[in-house]
Each structure stands twice: as C-alpha cells, then as structure tokens.
Amino acid sequence: MDNQDLRNEQVYDRTRADDLIRQQAKALGISRRKLVQLLTAGTGAATLGLLPSHQVRKVAQAQANTIAQAEETPPIVKEIRPDWFFQAKINLEMRWENMYNRGYLVPNNLFFVRNNNPTPRIDPANYKLEIFGNGVSRPRSFSYDELLNMPSISVIRAVECAGNGRSFYKTAYGKEASGTQWKLGGIGVAEWTGVPMREVLERARVKSTAKDVMPISLDEKKVQRPIPIEKALAEDTLLVYAMNGDILPPDHGFPIRALVPGWMGIANIKWVSSIQVSTSPLFSLYNTEKYVLIGDDYPVSEELQKAGVLGEITTEQKPKSAFELPWDGEISSGKRLLRGRSWSGQGKITQVEVSLNNGITWQSARLREPNLEQAWVRWDIDWDARPGNYKLQARATDERGNKQPLSVPFNQKGYIYWGVVTHSIRVV
Ligand SMILES: Nc1nc2c(c(=O)[nH]1)N[C@H]1C(S)=C(S)[C@@H](COP(=O)(O)O)O[C@H]1N2
Ligand SMILES: [Mo]
C-alpha cells in the first residue's frame, strides 16, 4: 500500500487521526505526546473532553439549505416484502436467495437500505446543492436541472455497509458487537450514473490548497463524512442521480447521493444538500466515532502508538462471500448449481473455494464474468444435492492475496467481519 495515497481509505483515516490528535492536544494546551500518553494510560477520550462536537456544530451551522421533512410519512419508501428483506428498524438487509440466477446487478427494489434516519422526501424543484467553505474561491449552488445537464458518467460499483457480516461476531464469540446484526446482505452492486464530483468542485473554483471535502445530507441528523480532496477529484467519485437506469429512488438518496467507490458504505452520503470544501482537515461524528475508539474499552496497540496513531481500526473491506440461498432454509434435492458471489474492497477476486462439509474438504468454484473491481464476482459449482443437512462454506482470495480466514478478532462495533461463514441448509 502506498502510505501517501489519501485515496486509500485506511491511509486517509490514519492521517486524519493524527491531525485530530494534534488539534485536540493544542485545544487542551498540552503536547501531542502527552495526550497520547494519557490516552494510552486508559483515560477515556470523553473524560478528556475530546469529542469534537464543536466541529460538528460548526458544520451544521454553516449548513444553510435544509428542506423540512413532511411529517407522518413512513421512514422507508420502497416496498418492504418479507421475502425480499430482513428488516431491522429502518434498515433493510437483502435476502441473498433472490440473487440466485440473477444478473450481475441488484435491482433497485431488492437493494439493501441502511438509514440512520428516515428517508426524507425532497422536492427536486426546491432542491439546491451548495458548495461552500474556504477551499473554494467561488462558492455557489446548483439546481437539480443544472446537475442533470452537466457531463456525466455511469459506473458499476458496490456499496457495502462497514457492519455487513456483524452478526457473525456473535456466532464466533457468543457476544454481540453493537449495531445492526447484519448477516451478509448489507451489500449491493448497481450501475450508478451521475456527475463527477470534480465537475462541481471545479465550477466552484476549488483551490489547490483544498484538503478535505465533506458531503452533508439533509436528513434529520445531517449525516456527513469527509473525504480527502484526492478522492473527491477521482474520476469515479460521483454525485449520483440515477441507479440502474432509473431515477435514484428516495431510499437511496434522491435527488443526489455521493458515490465513493471502494470506501465504507457510510462515505456514500445520501440526500446530499451541500458540500463543504476545506483547506484544513474536517471531522464529523461519522468518522470521529472511529477515532473515539480510543475510549476506555479500546486499548491502543504499541505499533500504532509508535506511529502516533490512536486507532486500531482498519476500514478497508476485505474479501467476503455469500451463497445465493435462503438463510437456514430449505431447498429441494437434485442436480443444481450451487451459486454465490464474492467481493473485496482491495481488488478483484482471484479464487473462490467451496466446502459442502463444514470446511473438511474444499473445491474450486468457477468464476463467471464479469469480475469487476470494487464490485463482485459470481461463481458456482455443480452440486448433486442429496437430502440432508449441510454446512456450506465459501472462501475467497483477492488479487492482493487476502484470503478469508476462519475467524476474525472481535471488535466492539463489529466492523469488517470477513471470516468464513457457515451457511446451514437442508436439502429435502
Ligand atoms: N444521509 C445519509 N447517508 C447515508 C446514510 C445515512 O444514514 N444518511 N447511511 C450510510 C450507510 S451507513 C450506508 S452503508 C449506505 C447505504 O446505502 P443504501 O441505503 O443506498 O444501500 O449509505 C450511507 N449514506
Ligand atoms: Mo453502513
């Protein structure tokens, strides 16, 4: 990995963690080293008064253009069929069996929904996208029509929640990681169409000194999360207005969402109403939450301490695999293809192995085209399924040589479970 390349999410997180420590030490009037010592000694970040809420408030104040949400509307707009989704509050997890024998893309109606707040209803006639901050020399806004008339591209990319697979920490360790207990359906692949973020930043005369770019949502809690200018200017970082050829559905961010390929789901801010561009590092609840890992329950590894970084979390997605089968379900016996998909945030999948007997023996699966980076690959094996109970497993390897391990160390918030998952199925 190139340690300088801020387009890499992990490099960016570590760099900004370091910036945050510097800022906080300065605010407390102590040296950065002293602060690291205090935190390492187990003094919680909250005790030290380090939650960067002042920064969050500042951003919220700067955020002018909020459209009120109609009251008493259901929190999710799309049809919630129990045979399509597992529902957890206002989140919808895709049921994998519906992808059996389907094409490469997840249709919009089956696509998972991860909402921190209810889906806001936005009238495109009143919609404005505002570009502001000291990182642009010509702050300005764009109407929905203006955006639709700008140069656009279409790309096929996955969006995956950082917590996808979280429930398997419980399976493995008997204790629940906090957050929505996703199985493996917190991911989807779609064709996204939109304006490269670069186009709007250039029209606002982004400065060469710009450092961070923060899309801000107009949902209830103004979800926002910064990305580095390097990533914001990447050709496939988009302001999306169409999904699989349809107008972007309300639950997926209508009228405009960010697409930040290869990064955690949360970077793909939905219902974007403004973008702050700053010449200094930006922080928000949605990434400092990760830095607040330095709290009481999160001891810091020595290695990272020495590097001056206070968070152990790695935010890059690793390879994962899912079968296109019902969860703990039943299928009928006979010759069939046993199918699934694998993906990784770190490059193409190069190999998938499947076990029908809980990992005792393995065989290679056939990979099917297309096999796109930052999306997924479909695979299958021939299976003469005889009646009985099976514990199926699949393990993928990506082009960086990451191979799904049998287990993954527990982390409190349950991110990035990429261990081999056992999928029980009864053949009748
Ligand atoms: N404004 C806003 N954007 C958001 C979220 C949110 O709650 N509010 N959730 C994020 C998270 S955690 C994920 S995983 C993705 C999910 O995108 P989807 O709901 O279109 O599948 O959206 C991200 N963007
Ligand atoms: Mo997420």
Image (cartoon, rainbow, N blue to C red):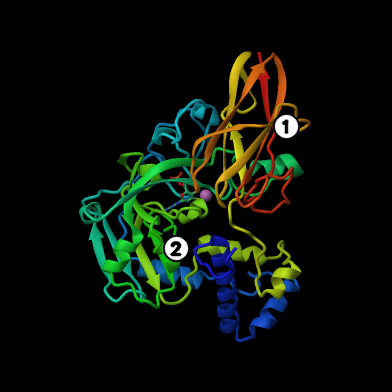
Q: Measured from the top left, where is residue 244 in percent x and y? A: 36, 39
Query: Residue drawn at (32%, 59%), measured in percent from left and top?
Result: 66
- The local secondary structure at tag 2 comes to helix
Q: Is residue 175 left or right of residue 202?
A: right
Real-space Cα distance between discs 1 and 2?
A: 39 Å
Checking the image for residue 157, the label placed there is none
Give the secondary structure at mark 1.
loop
Q: Amino acid at mark 1?
A: Trp
Q: Position of residue 69 (x, y in %)?
A: 33, 50
State whether residue 386 is above or below residue 369.
above
* Left or right of 41, for residue 186: left
Of the image marks 1 and 2, the number of the one nearer the N terminus: 2
User: 374 or 60: nearer the eye?
Assistant: 374
Quarter placement of the N terminus: bottom right
Residue holding disc 1: 362
Q: Quadrant of the C terminus?
A: top right
Q: Is mark 1 within 8 Å of ligand 1?
A: no
Amino acid type for the residue under numbered disc 2: Lys
Q: Is residue 87 visible?
A: yes
Tell me which residue sits at (55%, 38%) in the image: 185
Q: Is residue 291 left or right of residue 120?
A: right
Marking on residue 231: 2
Residue shown at the point (59%, 41%) measured from the top left? 182
Determine the residue located farthest toward the right in the rendered image: 360
Q: Nearer the viewer, mark 1 or mark 2?
A: 1
How many numbered marks appear? 2
The image position of residue 267, as x and y in percent, is 47, 56
The answer to whether marks 1 and 2 mark residues whose Cβ atoms lie closer than 8 Å is: no
